[in-house]
Image: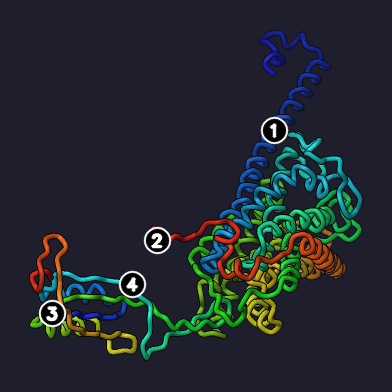
């Protein structure tokens, strides 16, 4: 099992969600987040005062998939979330040792 | 009247004297009916106006200021305005109405009307002949509430609630009451219609409300010092949305403020209403264009700040100027206040947190002076029909009177506010502790939070 953490533009959330559901991903966790990568934020002006805002609103999406689903899921995310400009976000992959369904103690991929 | 109507066939028996007496009585009855109808019309508008002006404080100003502070101070900021709605009201009933509008000398009213003695439902012909004196009293009270509330923008996010209350009570007694008496009270030094020595035109409070509050705001900001971390720590508004709603409520409420200052519902109210609206619109454009040119983008906060600046500047002039003059005053105010807030504040480095001085002090001063330029005898023949009123009509002397009014308002505000700040500072201290300031006024002063994200 693999965990995909994708930090994406908030405006791309619906497209990414739809793309993942289409390839058969059944569960996901969404967090409203703030952060920046190389993009380093932007400046705002309030009554002439300049404020640099370096933590921008993002959405963090976490899904855990079976190993053979991994590449399809990555493709779905990059395809739906890409605009080609700075600030599109990142995807991180990590191994998951175990998954447990709380309702009935099912373990492994069946619990996903 | 019914019994005066002669029965058919008996008219020949009435003498001429009887007929004249009957007609005279009918005339008198008609006059009473007309007066009652006018009172009903005028009083209806004035009660609505009073309510509109109260709405400017809460929620208007409370939202406008509340959105501009950081999250942790929103309730503390709103409470400062709301406290005025309660405290200044009680004080007004006890003593400040009498000090402002009671019979007195040229500078302050006497104590004849303390506890609203003699303030009944009959009109006071000198102030407003067609509305109950209590309507006049409660209408003027709404001005006395919002004026100190405007000052709170200068010391936002760092003043003790207790110190703020004592400061405001003393300020109402020492600064507002004499200024209102001088400009609007019977025999006031600057009163333009009730025999003032230097008749200063101030229709709805350019000097009384905006210069006094704005200048006192600057003095307070300087005396208190900057907020912790200012200007290094970023302190952007936490919700321009709230400020936007507040500013729009202020705009609507201002019709009661200015058009209501006609103290009747006739043509003068219309003139002031129109000037108010045009001034606000032109100033919103003025500020936005200046901002667009200098910073590349027209912000929502800039547009609403401009509208408020225009409303401030048109306040003394409404009721004296034509719609076209109102557009000019608004446009000038929008650009002028933009530079006061953006350039002048940055150049001097004072922390007038929400720009109470940059908008109200600067806009009020500018508006009071421009009133002397644009005042028009056709709009309002205050010095008599056909007599030149403003500079553009050839009465340059009026400009001098306006300047005298402005200077008196500045001096009274500076001296009065400094004395009050000194007293309150020595008595209970003005600022919250550094820990309390970091924690925010909501928790440290009121034990609650405006936004509870956890539930």
Q: CA distance from mark 1 to mark 2?
A: 58 Å
Proximity of marks 1 and 4: CB atoms separated by less than 8 Å = no
Instruction: Give the residue pinned by disc 4.
Output: A32
Q: Mark 1 or mark 2: which comes first in sequence?
A: 1
Q: CA distance from mark 4 to mark 2?
A: 15 Å
Q: CA distance from mark 1 to mark 4?
A: 64 Å
Instruction: Give the residue pinned by disc 2.
Output: B454
Mark closer to the observer (3, 4)? 3
Proximity of marks 1 and 2: CB atoms separated by less than 8 Å = no
Subunit ID for the residue under disc 1 = B
Alpha-carbon neighbours of circle 2 within 10 Å: few (<14), some, or many (≥20)?
A: few
* Residue found 80% across the figure and 45% down from its top: B95
Q: CA distance from mark 2 to mark 3?
A: 33 Å
Alpha-carbon neighbours of circle 3 within 10 Å: few (<14), some, or many (≥20)?
A: some
Subunit ID for the residue under disc 4 = A
How is the protein colored in the picture?
rainbow
Proximity of marks 3 and 4: CB atoms separated by less than 8 Å = no
SS at mark 1 in the image: helix
Residues behind callouts 3 and 4 on a single chain: yes
Classify residue A110 as left or right of residue B120.
left
Instruction: Give the residue pinned by disc 1.
Output: B36
Q: Mark 3 or mark 4: which comes first in sequence?
A: 3
- Between B210 and B403, the residue placed more toward the observer is B210
Instruction: Give the residue pinned by disc 3.
Output: A1
Subunit ID for the residue under disc 2 = B
Which label number is shown at residue B252?
none
Classify residue B452 as left or right of residue A99.
right
Mark closer to the observer (1, 3)? 3
Expressed as whole percent of the image width and height from the top left, the position of residue B19 reads: 78, 18
Quadrant into which the N terminus of chain B falls: top right
């Amino acid at each position: 099992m693999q965990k995909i953490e994708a930090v994406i533009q908030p405006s791309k959330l619906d497209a990414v969600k739809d793309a993942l559901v289409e390839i058969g991903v059944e569960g996901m966790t969404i967090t409203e987040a703030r952060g920046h990568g190389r993009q380093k934020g932007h400046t705002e002006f309030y009554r002439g005062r300049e404020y640099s805002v370096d933590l921008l609103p993002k959405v963090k999406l976490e899904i855990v998939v079976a190993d053979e689903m991994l590449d399809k899921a990555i493709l779905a995310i990059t395809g739906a979330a890409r605009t080609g400009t700075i600030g599109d976000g990142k995807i991180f992959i990590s191994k998951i040792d175990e998954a447990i369904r709380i309702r009935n103690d099912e373990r492994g991929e069946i619990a996903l | 009247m019914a019994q005066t109507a002669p029965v058919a066939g008996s008219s020949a028996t009435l003498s001429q004297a009887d007929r004249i007496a009957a007609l005279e009585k009918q005339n008198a009855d008609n006059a009473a009916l007309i007066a009652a109808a006018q009172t009903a019309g005028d009083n209806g508008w004035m009660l609505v106006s009073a309510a509109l002006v109260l709405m400017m404080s809460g929620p208007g100003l409370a939202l406008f200021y509340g959105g501009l502070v950081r999250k942790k101070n929103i309730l503390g900021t709103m409470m400062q305005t709301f406290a005025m709605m309660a405290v200044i009201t009680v004080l007004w009933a006890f003593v400040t109405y009498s000090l402002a509008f009671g019979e007195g000398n040229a500078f302050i009213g006497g104590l004849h009307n303390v506890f609203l003695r003699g303030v009944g439902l009959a009109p006071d012909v000198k102030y407003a002949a067609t509305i109950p004196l209590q309507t006049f009293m409660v209408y003027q009270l709404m001005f006395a509430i919002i004026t100190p509330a405007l000052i709170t923008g200068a010391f936002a996010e760092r003043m003790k609630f207790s110190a703020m209350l004592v400061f405001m009570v003393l300020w109402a007694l020492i600064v507002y009451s004499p200024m209102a008496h001088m400009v609007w009270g019977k025999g006031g030094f600057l009163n333009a219609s009730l025999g003032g020595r230097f008749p200063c035109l101030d229709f709805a409070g350019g000097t009384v409300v905006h210069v006094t509050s704005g200048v006192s705001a600057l003095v307070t900001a300087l005396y208190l010092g900057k907020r912790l971390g200012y200007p290094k720590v970023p302190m952007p508004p936490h919700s321009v949305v709230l400020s936007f709603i507040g500013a729009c409520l202020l705009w609507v409420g201002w019709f009661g403020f200015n058009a209501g200052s006609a103290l009747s519902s006739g043509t003068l109210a219309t003139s002031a209403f129109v000037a108010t609206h045009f001034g606000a619109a032109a100033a919103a454009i003025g500020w936005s264009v200046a901002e667009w040119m200098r910073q590349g983008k027209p912000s929502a906060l800039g547009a609403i700040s401009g509208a408020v600046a225009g409303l401030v500047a048109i306040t003394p002039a409404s009721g004296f100027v034509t719609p076209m003059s109102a557009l000019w005053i608004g446009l000038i105010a929008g650009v002028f206040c933009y530079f006061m807030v953006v350039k002048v504040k940055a150049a001097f480095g004072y922390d007038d947190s929400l720009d109470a001085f940059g908008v109200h002090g600067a806009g009020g001063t500018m508006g009071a002076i421009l009133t002397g330029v644009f005042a028009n005898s056709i709009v309002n023949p205050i010095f008599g029909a056909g007599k030149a009123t403003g500079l553009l009509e050839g009465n340059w002397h009026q400009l001098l009177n306006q300047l005298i009014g402005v200077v008196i308002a500045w001096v009274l505000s500076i001296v009065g506010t400094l004395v009050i700040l000194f007293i309150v500072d020595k008595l209970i201290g003005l600022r919250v502790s550094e820990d309390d300031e970091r924690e925010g006024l909501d928790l440290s002063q009121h034990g609650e939070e405006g936004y509870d994200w956890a539930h």
